[in-house]
Image (cartoon, coloured by chain):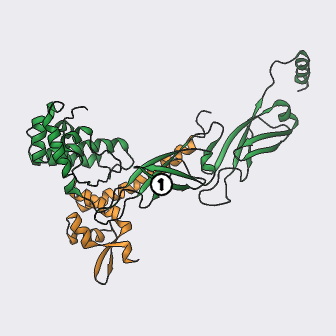
Amino acid sequence: MEFIDYYKILGISKDASEEDVKKAYRKLARKLHPDLNPNDKEAQKKFQQINEANEVISDQEKRKKYDQYGKDWQHADQFEQQRKSQQASRQSGQHFSGDDGDFSSFFESMFGGSGRSSQTKFRGQDYNAELKLNLTDALQTHQQTLTVNGKNIRITIPAGIENGQVIKLKGYGAPGINGGPAGDLYISFSIAPHPLYKRSGNDLYTTTAIDLYTALLGGETTIDTLNGKVKLTVKAETQNGTKIRLKGKGFPVYKKEGEAGDLYITYEIKLPSNLTEQQKALFTELSKLK
Amino acid sequence: MRTEDMIPAETFCIHHNIEMAFIYSLKKSGLVEIAVIEEKTFVPLSQLPQLEKVVRLYHEMDINLEGIETISYLLQRMNEMQQKIIQLSNRLSIYENE
């Protein structure tokens, strides 16, 4: 447990007045408050520190204790005594930041938990969670069980969900206070890139190799799509980089059953290597005909 | 809207230690929606997060109503831009590692 200098966090001197503390807190809160920095984890983390510092320094009793024992907190047996007595009156105050661990273990060792009795909110806090999926997971509507704060929640993930998309589960946040409604759970989806397929909206893009002879003379090639194998007819004299579109073979459209984007395939023509003498001779002959 | 989907504004004010006049001024500036049923003022549950946010901005950060209006507008724009960035990043990933 590291000693945390609350004065430094608030950018004030040890003899700062109550008014100075308030001003310093408000100034930093205006910059780093989660309400003003949605989805910014770094700002949220910093704000928690500021909040914790303010919780202590703005409270005369806590500030006195902090000033007295702060530096020697590791050896202060008295803290334990204080902690036990504080625990008895601990209240589970709610906060808006959404993550657990609003207070450092340093704070808890000194003051015994959040103790935010004066800032009780009516509605429960919102939770934020990130769910990692593979591209293939997002192909079909499926269910997943998440554990949020020790509670198992089974959710249905609709096919076609996008990377970065956020869904709200109403009432799955922290419980409300004094009969108030529970907060919401926001799940942000992070979809890992696929080694062969790239996605843009509902369309998929991939590259497939065809040999020189098929490209020149035409023929057939079979490719593996995310939905299974597809046989393609390659036109004669297909150029390298030719792009073809397979309508409806792309990604399913979010919450529109039966609809899908398109699959774009780019042909990459592989030139033969390790030519035999006969092949070389034939290519030479060909080159003379051009 | 059913009254079960709302909480009395008075209850909200008591919990947050704010005046009813504050709620009315928020309504006037278009920052929150309230409902009046049989002369009683209610806050729809869907408006609670927004209302609580405004209360925090007002009390904890000492920002006045004009400031909150500006912030709300900018946050909305920021949110739209963040969505746009996500969409563009997703599209850009097609051309990465090519």
Kindly indicate the quadrant of the structure image that contains residue A70: top left
Kindly indicate the quadrant of the structure image that contains residue B74: bottom left
Residue A131, position as x, y percentages in the image: 49, 46
Residue A197, position as x, y percentages in the image: 65, 41
Residue B22, position as x, y percentages in the image: 23, 68
Colour for chain B in the figure? orange
Q: How many marks?
A: 1
Question: For this rendering, which residue is in front, A219 or A104?
Answer: A104
Outermost residue to the top:
A277
Question: For this rendering, which residue is in front, A145 or B39?
Answer: A145
Q: What residue sits right under mark 1 in the picture?
A: A153
Residue A11, position as x, y percentages in the image: 18, 38
**B62 versus A191 height, above or below:** below
* Relative side of A121 to A254, left or right: left
**B7 versus A66 height, above or below:** below
At 21% across and 58% down in the image, what residue appears?
A: B59
Colour for chain A in the figure? green
At 16% across and 30% down in the image, what residue appears?
A: A75
- Pointer 1 indicates a residue of which chain? A
Is residue B24 visible to us here? no
The N terminus of chain A - image quarter: top left
